[in-house]
Amino acid sequence: MQAAFAGFALGFSLILAIGAQNAFVLRQGIRREYVFATCLTCAVSDAILIAVGVAGFGALAQAVPWLEIVMRYGGAAFLFWYGARNFHAAWQGGEALQTQGKAKASLKAILATVLMLTWLNPHVYLDTVVLLGSISAGWDDKLSFALGAMSASFVFFFSLGYGAQFLTPVFARPRAWQILDAFVGLTMWAIAAKLVL
């Protein structure tokens, strides 16, 4: 149980910071668009990356220097593009939360975006695979450590996605969406700049 709690605490602390993936989950939760699918995709992706890290892939990432460079610049380019989309939405404005009617985006488009935000983000590999994987090496019970970290991902993403609905009254106003889109855009560009610099 000690290894499981340590894995849970570390896993939770690594995904707690606002990042591209978390901002997207928050937005989907507020919009109430495919929240379960979005949260499940993020949590399962995290679980796969944790398993790979604990299994020793972190050593491979450190042994192949060019892999980190490709992930860094590819991820930065994607985050810059996605941030620009959010700034464009903030500039146009006019969106308000609609709880009635059909969702604006398709499930396929939402899942494609969340998968790109997850798998094209070099921070995910550095934090989840390399860092968490290397720390797990210090534990005899690596399986419990990994399961604890995976549990943290499920708890976090589903809490964020479904907890966002409490912000629904705020986002009934178009101005709130403009602020959120601008915030998400700034977050994406800040992460992209950090990757490049």
Image (cartoon, grey):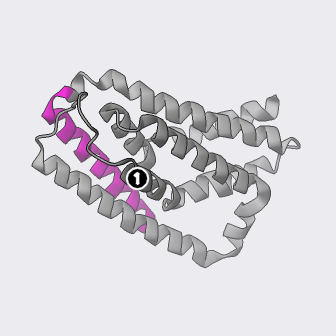
Q: What stretch is highlighted in magenta?
A: 172-197
Q: Which residue lies furthest to the right in this view?
A: 140
* Residue under the point 42% across and 60% down: 194
Locate residue 115, reporting x and y percent.
Answer: 48, 55
193 is within the stretch colored magenta: yes
Asked where in the image residue 56 lies, by quadrant, the reply is bottom right
Residue sitting at x 77%, y 40%: 145
Residue at 20% from the left image edge and 37% from the top image edge: 177
**Residue 108: x and y, percent?**
40, 53
- The quadrant of the picture occupied by the N terminus is top right
Whether residue 99 is situated above or below residue 138 in the rendered picture: above
Secondary structure character of the magenta stretch overall: helix
Q: Is residue 114 visible to the viewer in this orientation of the structure?
A: yes
- In what quadrant of the picture does the C terminus appear? bottom left
Q: What residue type is labelled 1?
A: Lys
Residue found at x 17% / y 47%: 90
Relative to 157, does residue 132 appear above or below in the rendering?
A: below
Q: Specify whether 170 is left or right of 131.
A: left
Name the residue carrying label 1: 108
